[in-house]
């Protein structure tokens, strides 16, 4: 045994190996592995299957102690009685490490698909070792000794304890110790699931593996379960200390996805260009893409909305995000969990939000021409959840401009402006949804560049001085300040403008309840792929997807 890992009994008992797997020549192993016609005895077949993980353990122990139990791996000479301690594994959470930098012995043995058990064994071992390392000034100790004593064996119980603390108060007021406890309990649960999966292979089971198999989920959906546990860890705790370990596990799990899994999705979303918008109050539009200097001149002369064409045409996302298959690939076959808004508008009483697998979101909301349920991945820091997607976009240079300080009284009264922190870099959010997804009329306490990547969106804007005619909410019954959101649901007015069938009664009710609204002056535009829209600080804006659509917004001040 090394640490908490028991070597298979056949390895120590087989006379052919004499306790030392290095006695099988590399040439012989390569032939067995690569040529199906080569006959192998049971022991050789087992060793080829498990070679990567076993050799990893042997080499790690040898590095630390210069011995590996019965024999030295280089000379195969027996060693004297020694105390073999658990190897100190270099983890990927340390600063400056890279998940792809390790010399992975399984890669030399044919890859994850050819040795899934060895890979999963090794991954469980690495996560376990990371969790067993002492973190200086560990705040989780503040949760008390009781949960820490049972966390490795009874992670579900500890998750329940920590979740109660996370769920009973606002996130910003939760002590970090409870977030750390939840994070580590999730990772211990991942170890249990991995070991149960290894045990399910059903060969050469140790007593510990048999126990794991008895306690394993019976639905066989172990991969989705691990991913859900990790995503909840990130989204509920913020993963304050082991975020890189989460990303490493995701990367390793991507190597066991079933081959051809993405082919069941269409290669591209069906998107039809809408009719051109005929309007007398269109947003100003540049003739072509402008540079930072030209944009700064616009800000200095007139702080008004501006459409700049072809800004995102060179982004990888402009092509890749059209493909459901690509998005599925980068969400681990759609298993990653994302926060989805359900309902027409977040101001409606029946509006809700829940975590949903990306596959479920795609099948129910993005692919159907008329989805039964409107779901919106709205204002989400998707690049924090899935860092690989960030390589598909670029921050526009316009975000490094310097808007002149506003002297307009209405702008200075923008909700949230007085408490908005100064930003050293833009706040980036992703918006993805089907036709019909809407964001109600609202303001932001930052300047905003909204980049249209895929599909088409209608946007209507009102200047800050129109605020009295837009009837902002106040503080709601839950104590939430909604002053940045209008009470007026303008979707019926927009539908009428776009030529859709509209209930005249609904329009009449809006006009009667908010009589000044029809006097408010506005600008409007349909954004096409490649366009970006500058929304100045304090400007009210309503956004509606006319097709399946993805956008990226950049806030800056």
Image (cartoon, grey):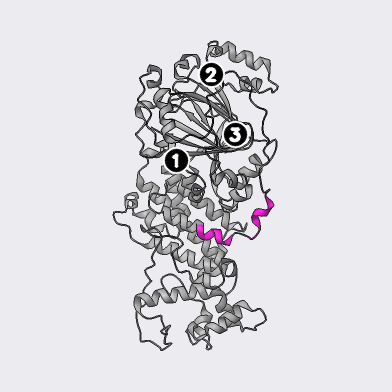
Residue shown at 42%/46% (left/top)?
Answer: 238
Judge left or right: residue 134 versus residue 291. left
Q: Which label was assigned to residue 60?
A: none
Mark in the foreground, 3 or 2: 3
Question: The N terminus is located in which quarter?
Answer: bottom left
Q: CA distance from mark 2 to mark 1?
A: 41 Å
Mark in the foreground, 2 or 1: 2
Q: CA distance from mark 3 to mark 2?
A: 20 Å
Mark in the foreground, 1 or 3: 3
Q: Which residue carries the number 3 mark?
A: 528
CB contact under 8 Å: marks 2 and 1: no
Above or below 420: residue 518: above
Q: Which residue carries the number 2 mark?
A: 522
Foreground of the two, 31 or 137: 31
Farthest residue, direction left: 137
Q: Which residue carries the number 1 mark?
A: 167
Label 1: which secondary element: helix
Above or below 313: residue 106: below
Foreground of the two, 188 or 320: 320
Magenta span includes 59: no
* Magenta stretch, overall SS: helix
Mark 2 neighbour density, 10 Å: few (under 14) some (14–19) many (20 or more): some
Numbered range of the magenta stretch: 251-265
Residue shown at 52%/23% (left/top)?
Answer: 461
């Amino acid at each position: 045994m090394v640490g908490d890992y028991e070597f298979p009994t056949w390895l120590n008992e087989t006379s052919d190996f004499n306790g030392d797997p290095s006695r099988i020549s590399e040439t012989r192993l390569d032939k067995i592995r690569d040529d199906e016609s080569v006959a192998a005895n049971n022991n050789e077949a087992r060793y080829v299957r498990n070679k990567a993980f076993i050799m990893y353990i042997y080499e790690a122990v040898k590095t630390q102690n210069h011995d590996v139990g019965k024999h030295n791996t280089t000379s195969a000479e027996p060693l004297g009685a020694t105390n073999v301690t658990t190897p100190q594994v270099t983890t990927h959470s340390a600063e400056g490490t890279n998940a792809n930098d390790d010399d992975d012995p399984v890669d030399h043995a044919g890859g994850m698909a050819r040795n899934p058990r060895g890979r999963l064994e090794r991954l469980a071992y690495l996560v376990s070792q990371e969790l067993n390392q002492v973190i200086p000034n560990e705040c989780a100790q503040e949760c008390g000794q009781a949960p820490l004593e049972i966390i490795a064996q009874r992670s579900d119980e500890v998750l329940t304890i920590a979740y109660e603390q996370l769920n009973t108060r606002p996130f910003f007021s939760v002590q970090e110790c409870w977030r750390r406890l939840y994070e580590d309990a999730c990772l211990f649960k991942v170890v249990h699931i991995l070991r149960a999966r290894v045990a399910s292979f059903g060969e050469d089971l140790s007593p510990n593996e048999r126990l794991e198999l008895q306690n394993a989920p019976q639905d066989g959906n172990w991969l989705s379960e691990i991913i859900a546990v990790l995503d909840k860890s990130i989204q509920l705790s913020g993963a304050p200390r082991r975020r890189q370990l989460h990303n490493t596990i995701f990367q390793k799990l991507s190597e066991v996805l079933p081959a051809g899994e993405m082919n069941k999705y269409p290669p591209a979303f069906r998107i039809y260009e809408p009719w051109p918008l005929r309007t007398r109050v269109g947003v100003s539009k540049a003739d072509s893409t402008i540079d930072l200097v030209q944009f700064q001149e616009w800000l200095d002369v007139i702080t008004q909305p501006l459409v700049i064409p072809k800004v995102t045409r060179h982004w990888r996302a402009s092509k890749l995000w059209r493909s459901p298959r690509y998005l599925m690939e980068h969400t681990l076959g759609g298993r990653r969990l994302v926060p989805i808004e359900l309902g027409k508008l977040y101001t409606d009483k029946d509006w809700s939000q829940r975590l949903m697998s990306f596959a479920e979101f795609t099948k129910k909301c993005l692919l159907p021409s008329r989805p039964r349920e409107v779901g919106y991945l709205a204002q989400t820091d998707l690049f924090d959840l899935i860092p690989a997607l960030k390589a598909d976009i670029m921050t526009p240079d316009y975000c490094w401009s310097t808007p002149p300080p506003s002297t307009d009284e209405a702008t200075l009264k923008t909700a949230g402006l007085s408490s908005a922190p100064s930003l050293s870099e833009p706040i980036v959010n992703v918006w993805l949804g089907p036709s019909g997804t809407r964001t109600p009329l609202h303001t932001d306490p930052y300047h905003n560049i909204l980049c249209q990547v895929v599909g088409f969106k209608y946007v209507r804007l009102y200047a800050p001085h129109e605020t009295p005619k837009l009837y902002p909410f106040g503080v709601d019954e839950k104590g939430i300040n909604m002053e940045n959101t209008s009470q007026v649901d303008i979707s019926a007015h927009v539908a009428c403008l776009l030529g859709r069938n509209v209930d005249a009664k609904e329009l009449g009710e809006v006009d009667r309840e908010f009589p000044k609204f029809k006097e408010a002056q506005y600008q409007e535009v349909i954004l096409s792929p490649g366009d970006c829209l500058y929304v100045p600080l304090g400007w009210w804006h309503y956004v509606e997807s006319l097709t399946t659509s993805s956008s990226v917004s950049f806030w800056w001040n």
